[in-house]
Amino acid sequence: MAKLVECVPNFSEGRDKEIIEKVVDEVRKTEGVKLLDYCSDKDHNRSVVTFIGGPEETKEAAFKLIKKAAELIDMSKHSGAHPRMGATDVVPFIPIRDITTEECVEIAKDLGKKVGEELNIPVYLYEDAATAPERRNLAEIRKGQYEGFFEKIKKPEWKPDFGPCEMNKKSGATVIGARFPLIAYNVNLGTDNIEIANKIARKIRHISGGLRYAKAVGVMLTERNIAQVSINMVNYEKTAVYTIQEMVKMEAKRYGVPVVGAEVIGLIPMKALIDCAEYYLQIENFDIKQVLETNLSE
């Protein structure tokens, strides 16, 4: 069977549909790559694209997407609720079939070198591709965001892995790496108090002493006038979706705030949802082969 890699770029535009489509079109036009999903959020001002393909084809599509985003997005004029540092903010490669994490690391390095040299964009490697322990965590790299990176990039410890050692004013900087499948899971609160969302996020995220495989931040959804706990689950097998959901609900209770909804950004593995079904329905000895669609695909 042919090698299969998943790529999930996040780029900093979630409002202008014309720009979003032009960026996503770069993936659509690349042979050997299949666009699985893309979604945009106006409050976050961010879009997430998911596609799969062979190693070389996926790398080519990612480069074309980064190049197009650099042409169309001006970070000096960008604002949004989600932390960001570049026109294309982060580009992870995920092993799907007959390919190792180590091979995905090499893809990330090759792409990073090409982006740095040809597009003049500073590039940092993260997660399994990280060149230093403090660069594994995306949140640590991105701390200070676009605005703060003009000074941060001058520090010796934050020299980019590829590209110029000065911030690209228009395109910012980009983080590229290899990782386990991530679930972007957001929980909406029945309040417009962003500080409550921030407090809950601090309780949940690992860096503050919370759940080992969770990253979280409070954001404001201005269109709906509600606060949200925006969560990245970096290993759903070790920190389950239902664990996140229940912990947010538990922490929200102390402030007298209800959970009014949740959303998945991009795609989610079936196993993560089955784990939730087992937990909430208390199903015993459940097997994924009992799912109808699993049998149809065999």
Image (cartoon, rainbow, N blue to C red):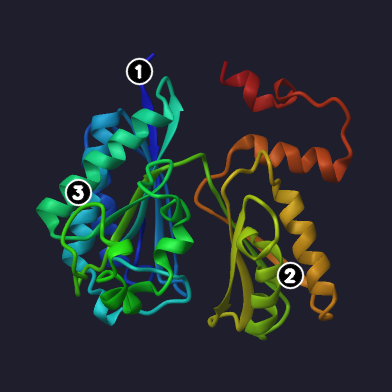
Residue 272 is situated, as x and y percent measured from the top left of the image, at: 66, 40
Say which of marks 2 and 1 sits in front: 1
Disc 3 or 2, which lies upstream in sequence?
3
Residue 77: which quarter of the image?
A: bottom left
Q: Residues within 10 Å of mark 3 (few under 14, many from 20)?
A: many
Q: Which residue is mark 2?
A: 260
Badge number at residue 64: 3
Residue 206 is situated, as x and y percent measured from the top left of the image, at: 64, 58
Question: Eyeballing the image, is 9 above or below 208?
Answer: above
- What residue sits 85% from the left and 77% below the top? 254
Question: Eyeballing the image, is 122 above or below 274?
Answer: below
Disc 3 or 1, which lies upstream in sequence?
1
**Cα distance, mark 3 to mark 1?**
23 Å
- What residue sits 56% from the left and 79% below the top? 220
Proximity of marks 3 and 1: CB atoms separated by less than 8 Å? no
Q: Amino acid at mark 2?
A: Val
Q: Which residue is mark 1?
A: 2
Say which of marks 3 and 2 sits in front: 3
Q: Amino acid at mark 1?
A: Ala
Q: Amino acid at mark 3?
A: Lys
Secondary structure of the residue carrying tag 1 is loop
